[in-house]
Image (tube, rainbow, N blue to C red):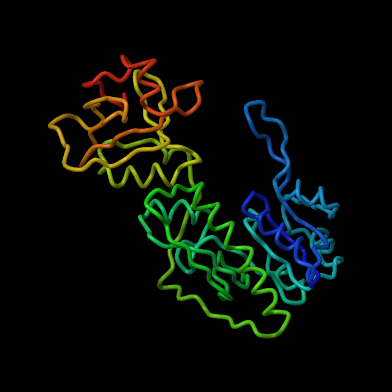
Amino acid sequence: MRIVFAGTPQFAAAHLRALLDCPSHQVVAVFTQPDRPAGRGKKLTASPVKLLATDQQIPVHQPLSLKAVAEQQILANYGADIMVVVAYGLLLPKAVLAIPVYGCINVHASLLPRWRGAAPIQRAIEAGDTETGVTIMQMAEGLDTGDMLLKARCPIEADDDAGSLHDKLAGIGPDALLTVLDEIAQGKVVAEKQDDEQSNYAPKITKQEALVNWHEPVKTLVLKIRAFNPFPICYSTLSGERIRIWKGVAVPNQDRKVLPGTIIHTDKSGILVQTGEGCLLITVLQLPGKRPLHAGEVLNAQADLFSPGTVMGT
């Protein structure tokens, strides 16, 4: 099949690579987000999809929007059988959905209709879900509302964070995508409508959400720490400094009659902090200007900063 691919981050690049490695498909063009400033130097940086497409000498287009007729004509000129969309970052107008022969299909990182929206991986972990997956769907006008063509399931393990779960889903998504493309080409694909009553929304993650509220139960905080790793990383303040918390473990039944956020105990295993219910053992953290370190290493250098009785969040 002649394919136009639209995607931006590494998750999308994994799917583009699978298409490029498949001899029965030809990727004739790639659409991706414009280069964005990244890193401390804010240097303009190409997306992982653009880097891969450029390396393979595939034409790359980076429109700010696909609403303009001129941009839609560029797409139409490729005569694509289908458009594959994976974490592109732009909404496709109705006119675009009708351009390819078989329309547009999307790889979404959840088991739809659960977790429609921008951050399904993080929201699934934050909610305490024990299973997620990838859904291949026929795109429609609504946000992730199209008919489902295939689901691939994946357990969420207790030690998964958003980074590890992302990698798992990026591993199972390409095979699911290739299966659906073969079924479409053979006229064998079976579409299933979504049950809107079972749907919920996964809004984009904001940095403000990463601020730890020590009055919340420890189970809630551990889920957030996992969900927001590797971005934006949960944080608290201590003596006016921002402390980023990369990993933490729930320690139930260790409550003290102290203010939530109070450091109870420190040793090489971590920093034990009172929460609204239960205690959090911080095991990996990051001080300003430093790299993430195990708590034991941080305490070796700055034990005084984390003296028992000190209250975090101040």
- Direction from residue 36 to residue 128 in the image, left or right: left
- Direction from residue 54 to residue 313 in the image, left or right: left
- Direction from residue 118 to residue 294 in the image, left or right: left
Comparing 237 with 269, the one in front is 269
Exactly how many numbered labels are in the figure?
Answer: 0
At which x and y percent is residue 211?
39, 35
Q: Residue at x 39, y 51 (%)?
A: 126
Residue projecting furthest to the left: 257
Comparing 58 with 146, the one in front is 58
At which x and y percent is residue 103?
71, 73
Compared to 297, does 102 lie above or below?
Answer: below
Task: Report the quarter where the N terminus lies.
Answer: bottom right
Residue projecting furthest to the bottom: 187
Task: Report the quarter where the C terminus lies.
Answer: top left
Q: Residue at x 49, y 39 (%)?
A: 232
At which x and y percent is residue 54?
81, 48
Q: Residue at x 57, y 67 (%)?
A: 142
Comparing 8 with 77, the one in front is 8
At which x and y percent is residue 152?
53, 68
Q: Residue at x 81, y 52 (%)?
A: 60
